[in-house]
Image (cartoon, rainbow, N blue to C red):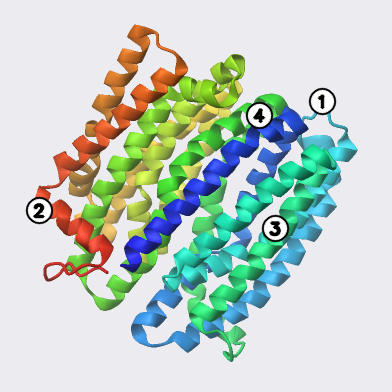
Amino acid sequence: MRLARNMAAGMANSVVVVLINLIALPFYLRFLGMEAYGLIGFYATLQTVLQVLDLGLAPTVSREIAHGAETGQQRRSASLLRTLGVVYVGVAVAIAAIVASIAPWIGAHWLQAKALPDAAVAQAVALMGVNLACRWPISLYHGALVGAHRLARSAATSMTINICAAFTTIAVLAWGVRSIQAFFVVQAGFGLLQAIVLHVLARRAVGERGAPYDFGDLKRVWHFSAWMGGVAIGGLLLTQVDKLVLSRTLDLATFGHYVLATLVVSGLQVLTTPLFSALFPKFSALFARGDIVSLEYLYDAGTRLFATALFALAFLLVFQAGALLDIWLRNPALSADVAPLVAWLAIGMSLTGIMYFPYTLQLAAGKPRLAFFTTLVLLLVMLPLVILLAMRFGALGGAWAWAILGVLYVLLGTWLTGRKVMAFAGWPWLTRNVAVPLMATLLPALLGAWISRTLAVGPWVAAGIGGLAALAGIGLGVAGTFAPREFRRVIDMALGRPTPAGHGLS
């Protein structure tokens, strides 16, 4: 039951966060302008890049707490969490100081602002550092709650605070100080509040009270954490290299278009983010038990369900991006510029999204070096690829690079996982559990796109046709990959009901 509850809570949180961003964006554009929104996009990139300083400790804490619950070593896990809390506070202070010191250079020499003065940009960048520092411990305590199978508590906190932060920010911009500096001040306050609340919840879930500080215990987890740190560094560079290159080569307004497209495609994280948070501790626990039968069943059945939903949503964005943007932005010229970016980014993000299953399996098996090697190869391909395509085709080149990278990741990641971790995660997994849902969702999406273009319907009708095509694709995907009795068994498994022997995965 915890698996289903955690997945539902994580998905609800992802939906709420995406909806908040989508609803708030028109207000931010109206009150701040496109250049200021480009600064918000740069902040998101900076936030992601600086996650390399986490050194893989947050997922390490998740794995340690999940293992501790299975092996009766909760107190050692609690001690580790308390010790890392001190480390994270020190890193937060360092982040604020470093970003503030380089803010003038970024404002004058990196960001290509035209309407905003350099001083205002530098102030905004400095406030980004404060915001990052306030939010820095969130990942640690979220990871602790994930490992303790308390994702629902973290999700509820995130939803509540993000809603309050969005409404407060809009109110301040509308009736108070209409500046990008005010935006970051409000966001920093709510980020600090979220970190404090998650800290309290994590202490209660893990039982940190009374656990000693033990900095020597960091040596025990350092091997796994070091490799995870390498994965984090490579992964963050991989996911942000397009934005870093484009923020340097494009004017700030055009870069804002690319950021807007990535925001739309982030809707796919409604599925991918809660997937990892729910499955990582579950996979880790199954490895700790040695229950490979249940692990394989969860891996295969989970992939089929996830791939069907992910590809259906991705193809809706690919083929109906223009209609959806017209409805949302009410700006045909802007929609026309952003729609091709959304389509190509959606292809790339859906392919990388399905690889959360091999990635999670590698980490749960205690083999982060495979994830590091894969990330390193992808980064070595992505960096020259995005530079060449961006220099030649601008923002569209960055989106094309993601689509190409997605194909490479699927092929390389599947081969490595099947060869080095579990044989059931190799090529048979790709052909049986990924290819079938992909085709089942693609055919209705193509038909819906053809009908919309042939009849030249308006954006609302086109979006409706796209939605019906996505639902039809989900139906075909489920019917094509599950027998009725097996599908009922998967539902029972997710809800924690009794299942046949070997499939008890509550």
Work out whether mark 3 precedes mark 2 in sequence or the reverse, and give the earlier one.
Answer: 3
Q: Residues within 10 Å of mark 4 (few under 14, many from 20)?
A: many
376 to the left or right of 279? right
User: Amino acid under label 2?
Assistant: Arg
Front position among marks 3 and 1: 3
Q: Taking 4 as reference, is 405 above or below it?
A: above
User: Amino acid under label 4?
Assistant: Phe
Q: Taking 234 as reference, is 209 above or below it?
A: below
Q: Which mark is residue 190?
A: 3
Q: Quadrant of residue 202?
A: bottom right
- Tell me the element at label 1: loop
Question: Dot 1 corresponds to which residue?
Answer: 114
User: Amino acid under label 3?
Assistant: Phe
Q: CA distance from mark 2 to mark 1?
A: 62 Å
- Tell me the element at label 3: helix
Q: Residue 374 location in percent, x, y?
A: 41, 50
Q: Is residue 461 visible?
A: yes
Question: Dot 2 corresponds to which residue?
Answer: 485
- Tell me the element at label 4: helix
Q: Are marks 2 and 4 in contact (CB under 8 Å)?
A: no
Work out whether mark 4 precedes mark 1 in sequence or the reverse, and give the earlier one.
Answer: 1
Q: Taking 299 as reference, is 221 above or below it?
A: below
- Tell me the element at label 2: helix
Residue at image coords 70%, 25%: 253
User: Amino acid under label 1?
Assistant: Lys
Q: CA distance from mark 2 to mark 4?
A: 50 Å
Q: CA distance from mark 3 to mark 1?
A: 30 Å
Question: Dot 4 corresponds to which residue?
Answer: 255
